[in-house]
Image (cartoon, rainbow, N blue to C red):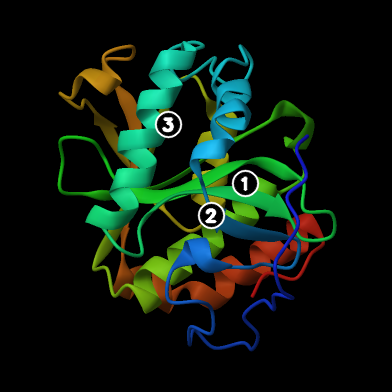
Amino acid sequence: MISVPLSAPLSAPSGDDVAYRGPADAGEGLATARLVLRRFERNDLALLDRLNSDAEVMRYLGGAVSLDATRAMLENRILRYYDEHPGLGVWATLLRDSGDCIGFHLLNHVQGETIIQVGYRLFPAYWGQGYATEMSFALLHYGFVQKQLAQLTANAHLDNLASQRVLLKCGLARNGVRTFAHPAYAAYANVAYFERTAADWLADYSNIQQTISAEHGVGIR
């Protein structure tokens, strides 16, 4: 994996309440016990291409994509989006202890929709270690508390039961099946759809936090 040095020490949010103590923009160092986010840059194209061309990673995402498609994603869906929607986006996810990039997490609009989703894409070497859950939980907290979003959503391929379990552990609730009209989602007609309002999620915050911490053996704050 590509190692990216951290420019300064980063501290995770602390305390048992739901007050937000992280950066104003998640890409400026939103941190958990083991992970930290940073913005993508143009020189990350090779890294992103390696992720998007991995057959295992893309199994439930329509299959591996070309370098040109990844370049368009980086320019339009990631870099341009940072400017158009401050505080939202797709961010590289790094291990805090080494700086290794393990993939990405996101908090952005479903393409062609007004709803905002949480999501992730990780290299297979980092599956099954609680990383997807750990940072997705932090992004839900960031979205509801820092960004004051009234509702957040997520979706997963109907056959991707592992990702569906992650979304449930993070405190989202399954709400049937949805179809999105944008061509980006043409590879799969229906997805398992999840959502939660800020009021409901924050009321359940302590229970979600304790469940994740107990299952993965790391402090989730």
**Label 1 crowd bin: few (<14), some (14–19), many (20+), radius 10 Å:** many
- Judged by depth in the image, the label closer to the viewer, 1 or 3, is 1
Residue at which label 1 appears: 132
Contact (Cβ within 8 Å) of mark 2 with mark 3: no
Q: Amino acid at mark 3?
A: Ala
Where does residue 140 sit, x and y in percent of width and height?
A: 44, 63
The quarter in which the C terminus is drawn is bottom right
Q: Amino acid at mark 1?
A: Ala
Residue at which label 2 appears: 136
Secondary element at tag 3: strand
The residue located at (38%, 42%) in the rendering is 78
Most distant residue in the front direction: 43
Of pointers 1 and 3, the one earlier in the residue sequence: 1
Contact (Cβ within 8 Å) of mark 1 with mark 2: yes
CA gap between label 1 and label 3 equals 13 Å
Where does residue 89 sit, x and y in percent of width and height?
A: 38, 51
Residue at which label 3 appears: 156
The residue located at (41%, 75%) in the rendering is 202
Secondary element at tag 1: helix
In the depicted structure, whether residue 182 falls above or below residue 78: above
Q: Amino acid at mark 2?
A: Ser
Of pointers 2 and 3, the one earlier in the residue sequence: 2
The quarter in which the N terminus is drawn is top right
CA gap between label 2 and label 3 equals 14 Å
The residue located at (48%, 87%) in the rendering is 19
Q: Quadrant of residue 188?
A: top left
Instruction: Decide if residue 167 is in sight here.
Output: yes
